[in-house]
């Protein structure tokens, strides 16, 4: 046998191995449909938890000024450090 | 915020006033007509002074800039009712020619300060995000309880998607069963800025390096001439240390959801995710009421159709706009 045969075969082996299809990444587990339904019933605001959202908040002070001038009303500004409607 | 859940305050705010809300972080910094006007207002109040200090509070004023009343946040319902009542008396005492509809002139706004003005991306989407602490009771889940007032209530935020990101989610020639990854920009934004515990105060966000895993997979489950529908399943691991067991803050969370795209209109009409996992640790403004150890936190993501003004409040993390959209 040619003494160089292993050297010839080795690259072919490497190429062959690298050409094998990779094992696909496992599908992320996700959450069961039952748990999805439960979380969606628990997390969003329930009865009585979203009262403040019934106020017709503007978010741009200039729009509020124009409305106030048009309607002849004063402005109520809730100025908060952070998301102004972040909590009930 | 509980004063704004009061029936009488709601009635007054809805019928007698023009209610507006704002994040003080933007308002006291912006250098445009709106910033100048807000400064004119707070300079009449106990919040006067350098814009480096907070201007948080409840203000009542006229459209032409006269302060009618101010109170700090966190006061009782009675105090807020009194504040509004006194302000309305002062307003009604103004000359009729000035306070009548059309009696005050509002000048042109001009250009907004691009650094501190925020609007949802044109052609994009707004997704409502709610969070809540949960507890396991055997095999059941229930709402969590918290020593911090309001900590058992939902946290709220919005997630913004751009029109390019929406386009990137939709394959040119979709096939039933086709699997793809949620665009990396969307996965990272969701993980870094929305899988957070914001139930007790402004949360710290996750650094890019804290995202140990963010795998969100989309599978085409339904194809019609009008729509493409996907299921989404995901796993995200966030931890402030590469050795998760040593991380002082972390969140190990699974997600599931459904997305549906209208082909002709080129919009999503459903973009819904649910997240559930174990969170631990706290940050500067969320320490009070922190539950020890790993505790359950749930989140829901729901597409908003046509947003009302209140639904265009920018995401909490959008203060750093470039970072929020992954341009850092």
Image (cartoon, coloured by chain):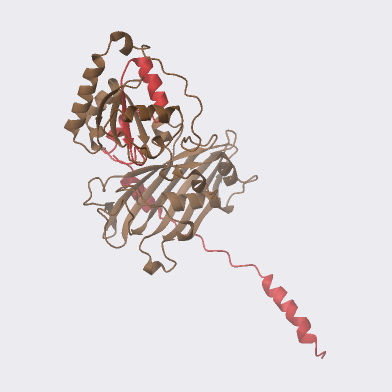
Chain colours: A red, B brown
Q: Please identify the residue farthest to the right as the structure is shown.
A: A2
How many discs appear? Answer: 0
Left or right of A75? Residue B180 is right
Up-down: is B323 above or below B269?
Answer: below
- State which quarter of the image contains the C terminus of chain A: top left
Decide if residue A60 is in sight here: no
Residue for point 31% across, 18% down: A73
Q: Please identify the residue farthest to the left as the structure is shown.
A: B78
Decide if residue B74 is in sight here: yes
Residue for point 37% across, 14% down: B104
**Residue B94 drawn at (x, y percent):** 26, 13
**Residue A84 drawn at (x, y percent):** 34, 37
**Residue B249 drawn at (x, y percent):** 36, 60
**Residue B274 drawn at (x, y percent):** 41, 49
Q: Please identify the residue farthest to the top as the structure is shown.
A: B97
Quarter-of-image position of residue B59 = top left
Quarter-of-image position of residue A12 = bottom right
- State which quarter of the image contains the N terminus of chain A: bottom right
Left or right of A44? Residue B302 is right
* Front in this rendered view, residue B39 or B190: B39
């Amino acid at each position: 046998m040619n003494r160089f045969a292993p050297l010839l075969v080795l690259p072919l082996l490497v190429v062959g191995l690298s050409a094998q299809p990779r094992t696909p990444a496992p599908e992320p587990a996700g959450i069961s449909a039952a748990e999805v339904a439960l979380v969606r019933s628990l997390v969003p605001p329930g009865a009585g938890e979203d009262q403040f959202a019934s106020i017709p908040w503007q978010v741009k002070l200039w729009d509020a000024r124009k409305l106030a001038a048009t309607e002849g009303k004063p402005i109520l500004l809730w100025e908060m450090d952070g998301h102004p409607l972040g909590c009930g | 915020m509980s004063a704004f859940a009061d029936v009488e305050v709601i009635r007054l705010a809805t019928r007698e006033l023009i209610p507006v809300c704002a994040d003080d972080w933007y308002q006291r910094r912006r250098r445009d007509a709106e910033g100048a006007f807000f400064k004119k207002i707070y300079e009449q109040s106990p919040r006067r002074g350098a814009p480096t200090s907070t201007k948080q509070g409840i203000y009542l004023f006229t459209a032409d800039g006269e302060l009618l009343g101010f109170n700090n946040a966190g006061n009782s319902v009675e105090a807020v009712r009194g504040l509004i009542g006194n302000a309305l008396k002062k307003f009604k005492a103004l000359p009729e020619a000035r306070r009548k509809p059309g009696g005050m002139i509002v000048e042109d706004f001009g250009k907004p300060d691009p650094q501190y003005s925020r609007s949802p991306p044109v052609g994009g989407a707004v997704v409502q995000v709610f969070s809540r602490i949960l507890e396991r009771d055997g095999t059941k889940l229930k709402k969590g309880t918290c020593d911090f007032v309001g900590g058992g209530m939902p946290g709220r935020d919005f997630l913004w998607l751009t029109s390019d990101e929406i386009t990137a989610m939709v394959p040119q020639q979709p096939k039933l069963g086709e699997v793809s990854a949620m665009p990396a920009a969307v996965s990272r934004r969701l993980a870094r800025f929305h899988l957070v515990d914001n139930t007790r105060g402004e949360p710290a966000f996750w650094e890019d390096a804290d995202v140990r895993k963010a795998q969100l997979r989309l599978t085409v489950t339904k194809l019609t001439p009008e729509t493409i529908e996907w299921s989404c399943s995901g796993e995200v691991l966030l931890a402030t240390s590469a050795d998760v067991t040593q991380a002082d803050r972390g969140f190990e969370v699974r997600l599931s959801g459904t997305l549906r795209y209208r082909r002709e209109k080129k919009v999503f009409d459903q973009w819904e995710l649910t997240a559930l996992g174990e969170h631990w640790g706290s940050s500067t403004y969320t320490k009070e009421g922190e539950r020890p150890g790993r505790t359950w936190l749930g989140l829901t993501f729901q597409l908003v159709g046509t947003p009302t003004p209140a639904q265009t409040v920018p995401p909490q993390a959008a203060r750093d706009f470039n970072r929020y959209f992954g341009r850092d």
